[in-house]
Amino acid sequence: MEWTTPVSLTVRAGKFAFDNRHTIQRYWTLAKAYLDAGSTQVVITGMPGAGKSLLNAQMHGRARDLYFEEPGESTKVETDAVTLGEWTKLVRVLPGQSGYRTHGEIEAFQGNGKLEGVIHVVDFGYSSPRDPVVAETLVTNDGLDTIEKLRARNLSLEIDTLKLELANVRKLVAQHSSLKWLLIAVNKIDLYPNQMSAALAHYHPDGNSAFGEALRVLQRDVGKDNLGIYIAGSCAYEADFRWNGSVAQSALPRKKQDLVLRDFMKSVAMITRIHE
Amino acid sequence: MTYNSDTTSENRPDYDGLREYDLSIEGQAQRVHELEELLELAESTAANVGRLADSVDRGRTQAWIATILASFFFSILASGLSYVFTTSVRVDSSLYYIIAAAASLNALVAVAFMMVFINRTAYVKRVKRDLMVEIDIQHRLVSMIDQQMQRVVHGGEYSPVHRAIVDIRVRRMMRY
């Protein structure tokens, strides 16, 4: 055998690997997701019922399967490989309840030098307790008998949840410089298509709400250049919202939902590319 | 009734401040009391989960040890029998009686360990059923505690220290 043969083979294999680096990295990340191994690169957080699991399923593409079942309450951290632009990222979804998310939170935020971004899912107050006993207590004991009252309460609680999340972000940014972006995913926009701008303004760091104020404080603390904060609308699932006999109708056609999701995915891909 | 999502600016709620809620001291005391009850129940469930998980681990270890020991005694028995069949040991010799006695003893011990294995496997299955029930209860309680915590936080004064204590108690419960 000529000495040039192994050299040629090695060079060709190297070129092939380089040309297909995205596919190789994708399968490598898929294997890690399957084995639930490896450090989290993107973490999805938010209040219970905000639609984190569904949004993740949409990002993954699983939600478009014919036999996809709507997830219920997540009691475990979900791990997935999601392709964002050219590269595939290891994404973990933290359950909304503090008891369930302990392990995932420690794994994602404590000394994780690989975490690149956080997607914080909010729903403009359109979530209700899954436990019927708690739901009834809110109506009968606490007087939250209309959707608007429930939303006002949820929006107030969202700020508490955000502040807890931002404490984790602040801590991680101080420890590692890998965390570069925070995306506020304004979910369930099918329930308020005509209030979309109001919702985005409510969650925007330049907005007048306490939510925006908390984001402004974070940006001031860690520096605008160190952490990019973005807002994007999303609609992971079209479903009416029901509370105590009232219904907020889902008013977004399927095609429009597809468009919103496509824009959302494009935004996430662009954000990851900006911060690479 | 259909809720119109086209809310005009006049009747749009003050998202950060609106609290049409039972803000009385009694109401808040009741919520805190309920939260404490849920926490106590969840802690006792978590203790049960821990105890049952330990029992499952212990039962599994015992089943494994019993399997290893039964295999060991069965292999000694097999070795002894193959020795008897492959060599010409006289039936009335003392060596024959010694081998026969040892083989019988071995067989008895091996069967005893097999029984231990079956018993431990059945025990693990039984305990796992109880464990599943306790875990199911624990999951429901964790969910309810979270919702109750939201009621308490939204319902009036609640010190951040108390909140942190509740959070620590909940996290400690979810070790298993």
Image (tube, coloured by chain):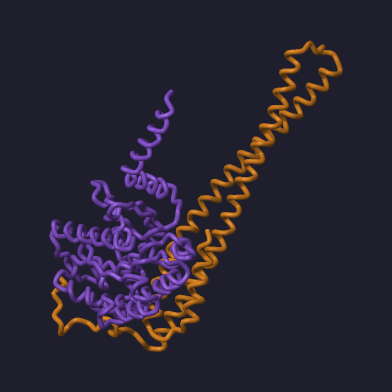
Chain colours: A purple, B orange
Give the quarter of the figure containing the N terminus of chain A.
top left
Residue at 49% x, 80% y is: B162
* Picture layout, residue A71 above or below residue A65: below
Residue B148's place in the image compared with A93, above or below, is below
Quadrant of residue A211 within the rendered picture: bottom left
Q: Nearer the viewer, residue A176 or B68?
A: A176
Residue A125 seen from this side: yes
The C terminus of chain A sits in image quarter: bottom left
Q: Is residue A130 something that shows in the picture?
A: no
Q: Residue furthest bottom?
A: B25
Number of numbered labels in the structure image: 0
Residue under the point 52% across and 58% down: B176
Q: Residue furthest front?
A: A3
Rendered residue at 13%/56% (across/down): A255
Residue A203 drawn at (x, y percent): 27, 75
Q: Position of residue A208 (x, y in %)?
A: 26, 83
Which residue does the image show at 39% across and 58% down from the upper left? A41
Q: Quadrant of residue A233?
A: bottom left
* B167 left or right of A71 in image: right
Name, please, the residue furthest toward the right.
B94
- Side of A254 relative to A188 (left or right): left
* x, y percent for residue A263: 20, 60
Q: Is residue B137 above or below residue B10?
A: above
Q: Residue A141 location, x and y as percent?
A: 34, 79
Which image quarter: residue B113?
top right
